[in-house]
């Protein structure tokens, strides 16, 4: 998104992408209203709909032993796989004039007060290495490894995100369903081509107990929540299980000179709110606007804009995740959500809806 918007402003842009597309990625694969707003302003909403994005109008919370709470979303969200969305965005950037280096990996980023960033780039097709010296480096590595303090990534959390695609799920295609499981949580949401995305947060200890067998972990989770068990009883997995560490950290206070983090390189919150892709694209939009300011780029101004995006959502999503992960608290929350409209409004605001 950043490459697309900068290219449209006549910047000379190079995208360094280490993966070969199309590729799958650990993600809830729900685009929030914020994300759809960015896509619409970029002229890409219709392209997403043509790619098969599924309109999601409700959320459903399933505690393990109680009645589900069915809630209309304040604004629709859209289910679309990262394989489809990322390829669509990359092609749009290419058409806008960006140079695409793919597959290629940025292996290091060094900065000095008096010079441009220096990127060490490895071409993964022939293993050659070269150095690039752009005026600006926008980092979207998803974990702040290249732009954190002293070039270090924030501490790991001990939790992993796991996901896979399924078909023949016995559930709605217009809802995001959240399931409280054994001390953790996850969800099902429809995506294109008649599939559902199953994405769950699980502790590393649970993965170790099952020797890294994610299918066995999912079977255990499905057995702990009857509604989830019913949804997937006749379902068929289409594609591999994927796992990735879940980052959680606030907006970085300082960035290296002429380096701008975007998306999860800038901050990372609990994924329960389905806001990750929306925040990533909105942060790209904000970064591009900041680079075009008449008075010049001001890192502190952009950092404040980032804080407004992430601050309330970060605390609210973390608290919500703790509630949903607890069977007792999840049943209480479902009861409150069914009957108390003021609590419902508070819950939506807490996760940024």
Image (tube, rainbow, N blue to C red):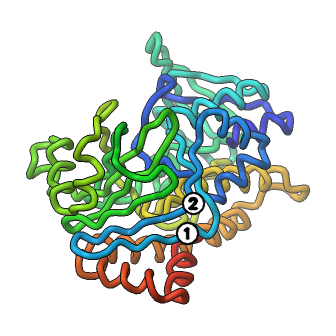
Would you say 226 lies left or right of 130 here? left
- State the residue in front, 99 or 129: 99
Q: Quadrant of the C terminus?
A: bottom right
In the rendered image, residue 241, in percent from the top left (x then y), is placed at 28, 37
- State the residue in front, 251 or 52: 52
- State the residue in front, 69 or 201: 69
Q: Under tag 2, what secondary structure?
A: strand
Q: Quadrant of residue 339?
A: bottom left
The answer to whether the residues at label 1 and label 2 have Cβ atoms under 8 Å apart is yes
In the rendered image, residue 237, in percent from the top left (x then y), is placed at 29, 35
Residue 151 visible to the viewer: no
Residue behind mark 2: 57
Q: Which mark is residue 163?
A: none
For the point 27% across and 61% down, the residue is: 227
- Neighbor class of circle 2 (other Cα within 10 Å; few <14, some 14-19, many 20+) is some
Residue 160 visible to the viewer: yes
For the point 33% across and 58% down, the residue is: 186
Q: Earlier in the sequence, mark 1 or mark 2?
A: 2
Q: Quadrant of residue 68?
A: bottom left
Furthest-top residue in view? 126
The image shows residue 115, relative to residue 240, as above or below, that is below
Residue behind mark 1: 72
């Amino acid at each position: 998104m950043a490459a697309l918007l900068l290219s449209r402003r006549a910047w000379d842009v190079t995208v360094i992408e280490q993966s070969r597309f199309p590729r799958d990625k650990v993600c809830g694969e729900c685009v929030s209203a914020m994300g759809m707003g960015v896509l619409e302003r970029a002229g890409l909403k219709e392209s997403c709909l043509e790619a098969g994005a599924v309109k999601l109008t409700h959320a459903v919370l399933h505690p393990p032993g109680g009645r589900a709470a069915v809630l209309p979303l304040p604004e629709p969200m859209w289910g679309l796989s990262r394989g489809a969305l990322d390829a669509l965005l990359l092609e749009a950037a290419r058409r806008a004039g960006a140079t695409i280096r793919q597959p290629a990996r940025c292996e290091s980023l060094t900065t000095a007060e008096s010079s441009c960033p220096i990127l060490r780039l490895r071409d993964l097709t022939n293993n050659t290495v070269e150095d690039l010296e752009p005026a600006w480096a926008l980092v979207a590595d998803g974990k702040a490894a290249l732009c954190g303090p002293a070039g270090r990534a924030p501490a790991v959390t001990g939790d992993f995100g796991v996901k896979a695609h399924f078909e023949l799920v016995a559930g709605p295609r217009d809802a995001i369903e959240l399931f409280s499981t054994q001390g953790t949580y996850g969800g099902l949401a429809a995506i294109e081509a008649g599939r559902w995305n199953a994405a769950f947060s699980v502790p590393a200890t649970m993965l170790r107990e099952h020797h890294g067998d994610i299918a066995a972990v999912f079977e255990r989770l499905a057995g702990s929540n009857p509604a989830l068990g019913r949804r997937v009883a006749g379902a068929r997995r289409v594609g591999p299980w994927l796992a990735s560490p879940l980052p959680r950290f606030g907006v970085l206070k300082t960035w290296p000179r002429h380096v701008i983090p975007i998306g999860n390189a800038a901050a990372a919150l609990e994924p329960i709110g389905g806001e990750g892709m929306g925040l990533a694209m909105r942060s790209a939009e904000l970064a591009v606007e900041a680079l075009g300011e008449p008075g010049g780029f001001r890192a502190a101004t952009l950092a404040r804009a980032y804080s407004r995006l992430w601050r309330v959502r970060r605390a609210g999503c973390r608290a919500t995740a703790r509630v949903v992960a607890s069977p007792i608290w999840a049943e209480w929350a479902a009861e409150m959500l069914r009957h108390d409209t003021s609590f419902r409004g508070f819950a939506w605001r807490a996760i940024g809806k």
